[in-house]
Image: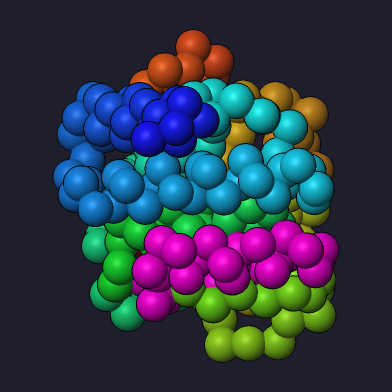
Amino acid sequence: MNPVQARSEATDAGLAKQIAAGTTELDLPVSTAQIDRFVAYIRLIERWNLTYNLTAIRNPSDMVANHVLDCLAAAQAIIQERGPGAGRRLLDVGTGAGLPGLVVAAVSPERDVVCIDSVGKKAAFVRQAAALLELRNVTVLHDRVENVRSTAFDEIVSRAFATLADFVETTRHLLREEGVWIAMKARLTANELEPLSVHPYRVQPLHVPGLTAERCLVWISKKASAR
């Protein structure tokens, strides 16, 4: 084994250990095979980043905490709040590198997950990543969400798409009456809440292993209750 290959395998082993420790801390069951696929996913982001700048984070270890574990924490909260996902359709708006849609799809295989991005290269990346992660429950769209006319979704999620008001208004036509919007945020400010036509019924703090920064999920529904 040459030195470059040895360093690469050592890095992969370290990333796998970091993911495994994080999922244990989250008390989220993830198989060894899934962990290996998440490592491969991070490596794919790393390679595409050289040309297409999918994410500002460059260090693979930082990607574990800021991307994979961040989205796994959100996925766990979604499953706990909304159930395992049988018969549910989830839309990830402005998916970028497939975050959080691909991660949710990986740990909630009964959900039908649609990832949409208006940037062609990002949509192409997500298609390749979905194949790498062996996700048969993922559809990728290259389009603006305003142009989509589809069967309504039970859950619409965004990670860094827009302000809360823009997120809600640009996707309102796609959410079922009993559905929920789920916004991943670092923190929620009064300035973001003021323009909303509907208001959160829950702001849920998230603990992300390896991160000290604040994280939360903002839950919004068309009705008083999302149940």
Q: Is residue 119 magenta?
A: yes
Residue 64, magenta (yes or no): no
Is 35 on the left-hand or right-hand side of 3? left
Can the viewer see residue 220 in this picture? no
> Residue, x 53% and y 37% (percent of image)?
67
Q: Residue at x 53, y 61 (%)?
A: 129
Residue drawn 58% across and 56% down?
A: 98
Residue at image coords 54%, 77% = 139
Q: Looking at the image, what colour scheme do you see?
A: rainbow
- Identity of the residue furthest to the front in this view: 2
Question: Looking at the image, can residue 48 be seen?
Answer: yes
Q: Is residue 41 left or right of residue 126?
A: left
Rendered location of residue 206, percent (x, y): 42, 28
**x, y percentage for residue 148?**
73, 81
Question: Residue 183 placed where, x, y %?
Answer: 58, 45
Magenta region: 111-137
Q: Position of residue 219 (x, y in %)?
A: 50, 46
Quadrant where the N terminus sits is top left
Rendered position, 218 above or below 113: above
Q: Tell me: 137 left or right of 31.
A: right
* Residue at far top of view: 212
